Structures are given as structure tokens and as C-alpha cells.
């Protein structure tokens, strides 16, 4: 079972930006700002991985050992291991608010798209031609890199069914129905829920670039404009890679707001309110990205 959703942590990361352990210098290049943004996002993703439930991990170990014992027709050991496997979960099962899922593994995977929006446009134009010629694998090879995201995957044990499966297996062992006990345990040991939380990297970059531009707009116009150009490009990449939102704010409106700020910086340079409006629009846009479970 696999679900894709936006967790509270991921939403927070996207909405507020990165709680940076490192900040870019005011004279940093666009590349340096992007690198710091990505590094901080990776660190935050690692630190916010689901806290694994050791009791659940230990219970799985005991259940597996029970299965091995049954393979050897050692019913006495299997019974002890099943009792121990259930015992590992006693405190959790006895709590008033029994959790539905117990995390037993957590993985962070980063795929950064290093091309430009024009590169994406070229690739997307090429794929239909390849498919029309039945060159499916060539088209597939072009599609695979078209993602730029941090995926945080948590594998969990469903507490609604797992303990009952152990009890049923123990019942079968008690009645010497070893094969049925093995079948139940095999299912219990292979039934997990995988939840993948997705953080689009281009939106993180755009957020940090806009913040960096806002911080130096008064003292370094050219650098501030360069940051905004890069933020605009990051938004184009996010759009072209299909990171969509149900927000009433659109990529087009975000781009228009960036253009308005750039015009203001080149003129009277009173862009503070425009920056705040843009940040607010981007926040609202990101709040609703991946709002539906897939």
C-alpha cells in the first residue's frame, strides 16, 4: 500500500522556507544561494524523518524468528517468539490513543533536475516523436530525469491488523496447524504501509532566492534583480515539471509579481510591500500543492 501526501513537516518546510543552518552571504552567487537552500533542505529532511518505533522493529524480528521456527517445525519456539512479538507491543496497544501506523523504516531520496526550463521544453517536445516511432525506452529514458524533489518515505507497520495476525498465528500453532500459521505470518511480515512525502526543490529555491533578493534590494540592485531572475526560472522549472497547486494563485501571477518587483527595483526601488505580497502569494500557493492524496 503506497500513499503520497504532503505532511505537516513538508508543508511547513514549503510554506515558511528552510530553517537554515547556513545562510547565503549578501554577495553570494545564484548558484551558491541554490546550493545552500538544497543543503539545508536535505539536513531538515534528515532531521525530520519519522522517529522509528523500536518496539515494532523488535516485534517484527521476533515474528520472523517464529516463522523460521515453524519452517523447522519447532512449535514450542514459535509459540514463545509469537508471545514475545506481541509482548513488544503491549505498552503501545494499551495506550488510550493507539496509533494506526508504527514507523519501522524511513528513507530520504533527493533527485535534483539540473537543467533549465528550455531543456524541459525540448525534452517534452521530443518524447511524442519517439513514442510515435515506438521508441518507448528512449522516451522513458528522457522522462526519468524530469523530477526535482526530496522524497521522504516512511515504511510503517499497520497496528490495526498486525497484532491480530500474530494472535491468529499463535492459535494455529496451538492447534498444530503449522502451515496455516506460516501463511498468516508470511502475510503479516509483508504487509506494510509506505507513505512518501514530496518536497519540490524548485519551489524551495524560488523561496530562498526571493528572500535573498528582498534582503539586498536597497543596497545591491543588480544582485537583487539576478536573484529574482533565478527565482523566476525556478518557478518555470517547477511548472514545467508538473508541481501543481490548487491555489487560486498561479505560476503566471507569481511571475507577474516578480516582474513588478523588478520594475520597481529599477525605478524608485520601494519594493518592500511588493516583496511581502509576493511572499504571501507564494506561501498560499505552496500551502495547497499536493493537497490531495494520490
Image: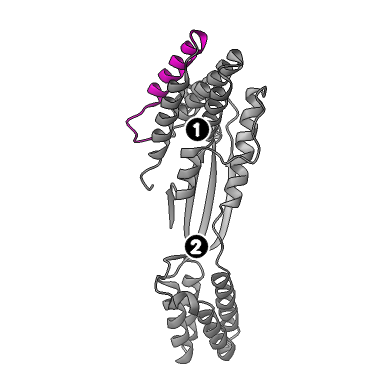
Percent across and percent down for residue 149 are: 53, 39
Percent across and percent down for residue 89 are: 50, 76
Label 1 crowd bin: few (<14), some (14–19), many (20+), radius 10 Å: many
- Within the magenta stretch, is there residue 54? no
Q: In the figure, 73 relative to 141: above or below?
A: below
Choose between 62 and 108: the one closer to the eye.
108
The residue that appears at 53% across and 20% down in the rendered structure is 228
The residue that appears at 53% across and 46% down in the rendered structure is 151
Residue lying at the far top of the rendered structure: 267
Residue 177 in sight in this render: yes
Choose between 227 and 63: the one closer to the eye.
227
Choose between 48 and 155: the one closer to the eye.
48
The residue indicated by pointer 1 is 203
Percent across and percent down for residue 81 are: 57, 83
The residue range painted magenta reads: 244-268
Choose between 50 and 60: the one closer to the eye.
50
Q: In the figure, 144 relative to 75: above or below?
A: above
> Secondary structure beneath disc 2?
strand
Residue lying at the far left of the rendered structure: 248
Label 2 crowd bin: few (<14), some (14–19), many (20+), radius 10 Å: many
Q: Give the alpha-carbon distance from disc 2 to disc 1, as whole Å.
A: 28 Å
The residue indicated by pointer 2 is 156
Q: Nearer the viewer, mark 2 or mark 1?
A: 1
Say which quadrant the N terminus sits in.
bottom left
Percent across and percent down for residue 293 are: 37, 48
Q: Can you tell which quarter of the image residue 257 is in?
A: top left
| Circle on res. 104 | none
Amino acid at each position: 500500500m503506497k500513499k503520497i501526501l504532503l505532511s505537516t513537516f513538508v508543508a511547513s518546510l514549503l510554506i515558511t522556507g528552510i530553517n537554515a543552518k547556513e545562510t547565503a552571504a549578501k554577495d553570494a552567487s545564484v548558484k551558491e544561494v541554490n546550493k545552500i537552500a538544497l543543503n539545508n533542505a536535505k539536513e531538515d529532511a534528515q532531521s525530520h524523518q519519522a522517529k522509528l518505533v523500536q518496539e515494532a522493529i523488535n516485534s517484527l524480528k521476533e515474528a520472523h524468528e517464529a516463522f523460521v521456527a515453524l519452517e523447522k517445525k519447532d512449535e514450542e519456539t514459535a509459540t514463545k517468539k509469537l508471545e514475545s512479538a506481541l509482548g513488544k507491543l503491549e505498552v503501545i496497544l494499551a495506550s488510550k490513543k493507539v496509533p494506526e501506523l508504527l514507523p519501522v523504516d524511513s528513507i530520504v531520496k533527493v533527485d535534483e533536475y539540473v537543467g533549465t526550463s528550455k531543456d524541459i521544453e525540448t525534452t517534452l517536445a521530443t518524447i511524442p516523436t519517439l513514442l510515435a516511432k515506438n521508441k518507448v525506452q528512449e522516451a522513458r529514458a528522457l522522462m526519468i530525469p524530469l523530477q526535482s524533489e526530496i522524497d521522504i518515505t516512511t515504511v510503517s507497520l499497520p497496528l490495526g491488523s498486525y497484532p491480530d495476525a500474530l494472535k491468529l498465528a499463535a492459535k494455529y500453532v496451538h492447534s498444530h496447524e503449522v502451515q496455516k500459521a506460516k501463511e498468516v505470518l508470511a502475510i503479516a511480515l509483508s504487509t506494510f504501509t509506505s507513505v512518501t512525502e514530496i518536497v519540490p526543490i524548485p519551489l524551495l529555491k524560488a523561496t530562498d532566492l526571493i528572500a535573498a533578493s528582498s534582503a539586498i534590494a536597497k543596497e545591491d540592485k543588480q544582485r537583487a534583480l539576478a536573484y529574482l531572475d533565478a527565482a523566476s526560472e525556478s518557478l518555470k522549472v517547477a511548472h514545467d515539471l508538473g508541481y501543481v497547486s490548487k491555489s487560486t494563485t498561479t505560476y503566471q501571477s507569481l511571475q507577474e509579481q516578480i516582474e513588478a518587483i523588478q520594475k520597481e527595483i529599477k525605478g524608485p526601488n520601494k519594493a518592500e510591500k511588493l516583496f511581502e505580497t509576493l511572499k504571501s502569494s507564494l506561501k498560499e500557493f505552496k500551502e495547497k500543492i499536493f493537497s490531495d492524496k494520490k
